[in-house]
Image (cartoon, grey):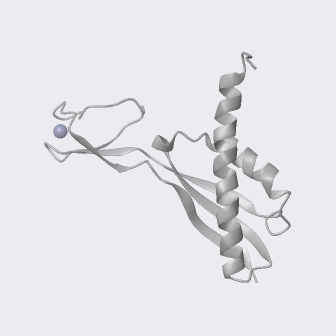
């Protein structure tokens, strides 16, 4: 099926699949700790992950309703900036754009990503 909203729908599906994977992980953590309830979840999401954080929170809030363990959990997202280090002059800089950048100090494109690829659970608060 084709429609003008297919791009948006695809994007949302991406966040839903990430939220589902995180819910699986949270259930595993809850089971391991014998938790009755998960009260708080903090996620680390790097800018380079391409995740739309609003969509991820929206997906998570929808999915958590199906899980009594999770239904009252608050989700917070810690967005990690995209930081590069220039391998030629060792300059570190934050890239505002995701497009392949060059070093603002020496224009080299020999860059290493220091942060911004994160996509994981940072912290979980449980009620046991
Ligand atoms: Zn440089």
Total numbered labels placed on residues in the image? 0
Relative placement, left or right, of 108 versus 68 is left
Q: Position of residue 56 (x, y in %)?
A: 67, 46
Q: Is residue 100 left or right of residue 107?
A: right
At horizontal 65% and vertical 24% (from top left) the residue drawn is 7
On the rendered structure, is 43 left or right of 86?
A: right
Q: Residue furthest front?
A: 1
The image quarter containing residue 89 is: top left
Residue 53 in view here: yes
Quadrant of res 58: top right
- Residue pictured at 73% horizontal, 52% vertical: 60
| Residue for point 86% across, 67% down | 68
Seen in the picture, residue 120 relative to 36 is either above or below; the reply is above
Q: In this rendering, does residue 125 appear at all? A: no
State which image quarter holds ligand 1.
top left
Where does residue 93 sit, x and y in percent of width and height? 30, 42
Looking at the picture, does residue 18 appear above or below residue 66? above
Image x and y of residue 29, in percent: 65, 73
Residue located at (18% from left, 45% from top): 87
Q: Quadrant where the C terminus lies?
A: bottom right
Q: Quadrant of the N terminus?
A: top right
Where residue 79 sits: x, y (%)?
53, 49
Tell me the quarter of the picture where residue 24 sits: bottom right
């Amino acid at each position: 099926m084709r429609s003008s909203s297919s791009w948006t729908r695809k994007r949302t599906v991406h966040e839903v699949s990430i939220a589902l994977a995180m819910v699986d992980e949270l259930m595993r953590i809850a089971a391991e700790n014998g938790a009755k309830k998960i009260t708080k979840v903090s996620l680390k999401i790097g800018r380079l992950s391409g995740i739309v954080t609003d969509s991820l929170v929206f997906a998570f809030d929808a999915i958590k309703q199906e899980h009594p363990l999770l239904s009252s959990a608050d989700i917070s997202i810690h967005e990690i900036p995209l930081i590069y280090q220039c391998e030629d002059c060792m300059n570190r800089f934050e890239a505002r754009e995701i497009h392949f950048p060059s070093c603002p100090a020496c224009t080299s494109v020999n860059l290493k990503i220091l942060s911004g690829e994160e996509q994981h659970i940072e912290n979980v608060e449980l009620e046991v």
